Amino acid sequence: MVLDGAARFTVAGEEFDAPQGTVVFVRDPAVRRGAVATAPDTTALAVGGNPGKPYEVSPWEWVAEAIPAWKAGDYRSARETIEQGLQEYPDNPSLLYELACVEALDGDPDAATGHLRRAVELKPAFAKSAQEDEDFASIRHREDFPA
C-alpha cells in the first residue's frame, strides 16, 4: 500500500503507477515484484508472509539502511550498520562484500581484503565483480586481493 507519495510497481514483469492510497495485492508469493518511489518522501507498507513463520529482515535491508551514510561519505556509520547485519547473518556473502567496499573506501585495507576474501569464498562470482568495482580501487593492487 502506498501511504504517501507515489510509486511505480513491477509485478510479474508488468509495470504500473501507484499513487497514494493504492493497494497492490499479489496472490502468488513466488511472483517477482518490486517498487520504486516516483515522488519525494514516498512511504509504502508491505504486508505478507508465510503462516506460522515469523518475518525475517532480509540481509539486504542492512545495506539499504547504510546507503545514505555511504553516499554521504560517512563510511564509519555505514560500516557499523552493515556490521549489525552480519551479527544476524554472519556468513552472508553480500553483506561481507558490501562491508569490504565500505572498508576499502574508509581506508582500512586489511579489513576490506579479509571480508572480500570471505565473500568470494562463499560466492566465487564476487571475484569478478571485485575486479571491476571502483570501491576496491585502493586495494586491487594487493597480493591478497581475490583474483
Image (tube, grey):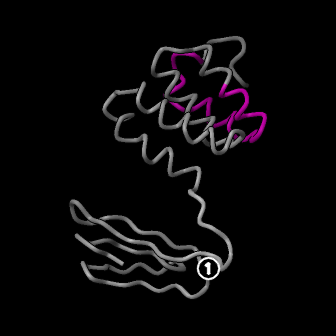
Q: Residue at x 58, y 56 (%)?
A: 58
Residue 74 picture quarter? top left
Vertical arrangement, residue 43 with respect to residue 68, above or below = below
- Assign a secondary structure to mark 1: loop
Q: Which residue: 49% across, 44% down?
A: 63
Q: Is 125 covered by the magenta stretch? A: yes
Residue 135 screen position, x and y as percent: 49, 27
Q: What residue type is labelled 1?
A: Pro
Compared to residue 61, the image places residue 40 above or below, namely below
Residue 94 percent across, percent down from the top left:
62, 43
| Image location (x, y in percent) of residue 66 | 43, 40
Q: Locate residue 93, reporting x and y percent.
A: 68, 41
Q: Quadrant of the C terminus?
A: top right
Q: Is residue 122 left or right of residue 66?
A: right
Q: Give the range drawn in magenta.
A: 115-139
Identify which residue, 52 or 14, lies in the foreground.
Answer: 52
In the image, 87 versus 79, the foreground residue is: 87
Q: On the rendered image, what quadrant is the N terminus found in? A: bottom left
Instruction: Give the quadrant of residue 114.
Output: top right
Residue at the spot x=57%, y=16% of the render?
Answer: 139
Mark 1 surroundings within 10 Å by alpha-carbon count, few (fewer than 14), some (14 through 19), many (20 or more): few
Q: Mark 1 points at which residue?
A: 29
